[in-house]
Image (cartoon, rainbow, N blue to C red):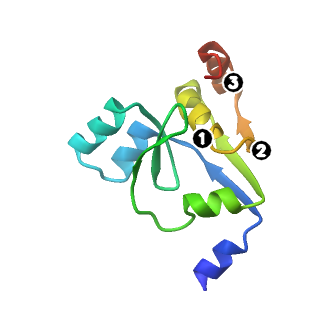
Amino acid sequence: EIEKRIKAIDLLLFGIGRADTMARRRGLNKNLSKDILKKGGVGEAFGNFFSIEGKIILHQPSIGISMEDFLSINDAIAVAGGEEKAEAIIAISQLRKDLVLVIDEAAANKIKILGGK
C-alpha cells in the first residue's frame, strides 16, 4: 500500500543534507564515512551520497522515496539553508534540471562564489 502511494506522488518537498552530517546521522562507520568524503561526497538525499557533479558515490538502503521515484515525480522542491550546504545543493541540483530550490541568501552567495559548479 505504501509503495503504491509513493508511486502516486506528484509533488515532493525534501531536504538536502551534507554528506558528512548525514553519514553520522545514518550511523555509518568512520572508515565508510571517510571513504565517502575521500571520493568527493558532498551531499545526500534518498539514501544516496553524491559528488558535487551529482554522481552517486554510495547508496545506503533507505525507507521511503527511492532515486527512481524521485526522478519520476512530476514536481520536486528541495529546501536547504546555510553556506555550509552550498556544495550539497549544487550536487542535488545536478539530478534534475527542473528542480525547484528554496535556499537562503548565505547558501546562494556561497554557490555564486563556487561558480555554481
**Residue 29 versus residue 5 in the image, above or below:** above
Q: Mark 2 and mark 3 in contact (Cβ < 8 Å)?
A: no
Q: Amino acid at mark 2?
A: Asp
Seen in the image, is 75 located left or right of residue 83?
right
Q: Amino acid at mark 3?
A: Ala
Seen in the image, is 105 located left or right of residue 80?
right
Q: Earlier in the sequence, mark 1 or mark 3?
A: 1
Where, by quadrant of the figure, is residue 68 drawn? bottom right
Towards the viewer: 85 or 100: 100
Residue ID for mark 2: 98
Q: Earlier in the sequence, mark 3 or mark 2?
A: 2
Residue 108 has which mark?
Answer: 3
Q: Position of residue 36 (x, y in %)?
A: 34, 38
Farthest bottom residue in view:
1
* Other residues around mark 1 within 10 Å, as few (<14) / some (14–19) / many (≥20): many
Q: Quadrant of the N terminus?
A: bottom right
Q: Mark 1 and mark 2 in contact (Cβ < 8 Å)?
A: no
Seen in the image, is 28 located left or right of residue 64?
left
Q: Mark 3 and mark 1 in contact (Cβ < 8 Å)?
A: no
Question: What kind of element bears circle 1?
Answer: helix
Residue ID for mark 1: 92
Q: Amino acid at mark 1?
A: Ile
* Residue at 54% in and 28% down: 87
* Residue at 59% in and 80% down: 2
Numbered disc in front, either 3 or 2: 2
Q: Position of residue 71 (x, y in %)?
A: 66, 56
Towards the viewer: 54 or 11: 54
- Distance in Å between CA atoms under marks 1 and 3: 14 Å
Q: Position of residue 21 (x, y in %)?
A: 41, 40
* Other residues around mark 3 within 10 Å, as few (<14) / some (14–19) / many (≥20): some
